[in-house]
């Protein structure tokens, strides 16, 4: 007798199997827009500016806070006092920020370099010897802003962190713990080699300063009022013989940014007023005036929608998806996952009841009732989904913005695609999961 599973058993479904041919075609087409978005939104500012453009094109209401936070708002049939449907994604990703006094000359290697301070959780060695582009703004003393996106065009120069050749790395790297072998302080970018003519000290640095002044009108002090970010210069690409995957920088969390944006842009008038909220600085703990920890932006939006609204009562009635990614089961490292409760690529959008670490510390542990509601919603539309927590108990952990919105009295659950090589310069997602995520948010917005 052949063994078969009980019909009452829970089993993860493969999204590729669950979707038919025409839906898979739609997923592949969707991935083309997605890759274009990723290529044009490599920083928080670029993401917000692109969101603003797309909202205007779609004739939807968009409210922006300081160029780093935004809300796309679609009024529903029901009054604001009945609550909102909100999907929140973060626009920032790990990267190397330039320090305030970045430029120096290394007399021994005969190079000009810039100092960086890494932003968010990175593995330092990932950022060595890869092409990096410089994005961001420099605000000059006259108040004028110079915008950078240098390293993206085919003929642009790129910037690199150098590394030691294997012939000489035995003592200083190979025999050390990885955290000691690669230091944050050493993530400096090579920016020049030609010395200036004449009697000036530090000739290579001097020549770079002259060039920056010539090309952009900058002086060295301008770096102090700048936000320059070194991000991978790679373009988003299909990955795999079957082109099933997307490889790109910044998919945590711009996968959720794009899918939630597109979901609301594609929605007709919803029952409840729907907001796609895009926040900054999640990767450094949501600290700052454009982040999930500051509620004034959301409060002001509610007041604008309905000046008579009781804001706290509205929030108590609101339902939220914290749109963020989860870790994909990683080949060769399956030991850190508890596989029944882990997310794999191609198995649909991932619902995470809680994140956090240790004994669920710092987690928003969503209610069974709310999970049931979302689960029913996804099942009704035949949207592939899976459930996961981030790794085995006590193996590590992480958090999302979910907890900040739960503190406002809202129902919140984490929902987003799985990402392989998360927080690396080239993250991988599955096209079918990206599409399932889009469908899930769209269903939620109109529920
Ligand atoms: Mn994230
Ligand atoms: Mn992250």
Image (cartoon, rainbow, N blue to C red):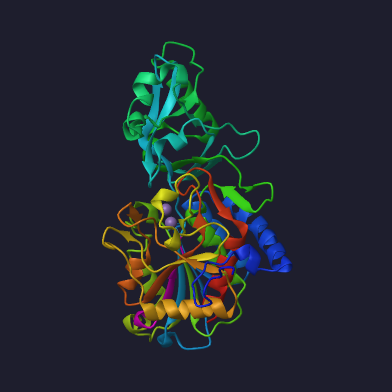
| Residues in magenta, as a range | 315-324
Left or right: where 16 falls relative to 98 = right
Do we see residue 158 in this rendering?
Answer: yes
Q: Residue at x 66, y 62 (%)?
A: 27
Do we see residue 304 in this rendering?
Answer: no
Where residue 20 appears, as percent x and y from the top left, is 70, 69
Q: Compared with residue 40, is residue 225 higher up or lower down, i.e. above or below?
A: above
Relative depth, front residue between 222 and 281? 281
Left or right: where 180 falls relative to 345 = left
Q: Residue at x 49, y 72 (%)?
A: 10
Relative depth, front residue between 318 and 66? 318
Q: Compared with residue 435, is residue 180 higher up or lower down, i.e. above or below?
A: above
Q: Residue at x 57, y 81 (%)?
A: 380
Where residue 24 appears, as percent x and y from the top left, is 69, 64
Q: Residue 355: which quarter of the image? A: bottom left
Q: Residue 156: which quarter of the image? A: top right
Magenta stretch: includes residue 125: no
Q: Residue 4: which quarter of the image? A: bottom right
């Amino acid at each position: 007798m052949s063994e078969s599973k009980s019909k009452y058993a829970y089993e993860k479904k493969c999204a590729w199997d669950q979707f038919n041919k025409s839906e898979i075609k739609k997923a592949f087409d969707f991935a083309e827009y997605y890759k274009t978005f990723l290529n044009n939104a490599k920083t928080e500012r670029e993401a917000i500016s692109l969101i603003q453009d797309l909202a205007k094109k779609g004739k939807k209401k968009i409210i922006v806070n300081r160029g780093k936070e935004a809300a796309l708002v679609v009024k529903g049939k029901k009054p604001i006092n009945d609550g909102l449907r909100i999907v929140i994604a973060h626009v920032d990703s790990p990267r190397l920020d330039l320090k305030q006094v970045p430029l120096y000359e290394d007399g021994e290697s005969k190079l000009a370099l810039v100092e960086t301070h890494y932003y968010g959780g990175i593995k330092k060695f990932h950022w060595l010897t890869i092409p990096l582009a410089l994005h961001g703004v420099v605000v000059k003393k006259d108040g004028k802003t110079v915008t950078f996106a240098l390293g993206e065009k085919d003929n642009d120069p790129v910037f690199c962190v150098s590394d030691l050749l294997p012939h000489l790395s035995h003592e200083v790297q190979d025999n050390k713990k990885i955290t000691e072998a690669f230091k944050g302080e050493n993530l400096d970018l090579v920016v020049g080699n030609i010395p200036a003519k004449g009697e000036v000290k530090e000739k290579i640095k001097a020549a770079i300063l002259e060039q920056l002044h010539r090309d952009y009108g900058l002086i060295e002090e301008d770096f102090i009022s700048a936000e320059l970010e070194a991000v991978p210069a790679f373009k988003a690409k299909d990955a795999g013989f079957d082109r099933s995957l997307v490889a790109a920088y910044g998919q945590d969390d711009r996968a959720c940014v794009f899918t939630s944006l597109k979901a609301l842009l594609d929605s007709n008038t919803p029952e409840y007023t729907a907001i796609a909220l895009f926040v900054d600085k999640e990767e450094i703990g949501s600290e700052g005036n454009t982040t999930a920890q500051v509620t004034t932006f959301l409060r002001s939006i509610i007041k604008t929608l309905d000046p008579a609204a009781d804001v706290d009562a509205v929030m108590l009635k609101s339902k939220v998806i914290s749109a963020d990614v989860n870790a994909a089961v990683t080949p060769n490292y399956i030991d850190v996952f508890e596989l029944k409760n882990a997310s794999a690529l191609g198995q649909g959008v991932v619902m995470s009841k809680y994140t956090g670490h240790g004994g669920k510390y710092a987690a928003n542990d969503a209610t069974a009732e709310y999970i049931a509601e979302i689960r029913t919603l996804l099942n009704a539309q035949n949207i592939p989904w899976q459930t996961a927590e981030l790794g085995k108990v006590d193996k590590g952990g992480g958090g999302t913005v979910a907890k900040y919105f739960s503190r406002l009295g809202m129902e919140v659950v984490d929902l987003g695609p799985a990402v392989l090589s998360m927080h690396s310069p080239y993250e991988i997602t599955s096209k079918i999961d990206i599409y399932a995520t889009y469908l899930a948010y769209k269903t939620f917005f109109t529920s």
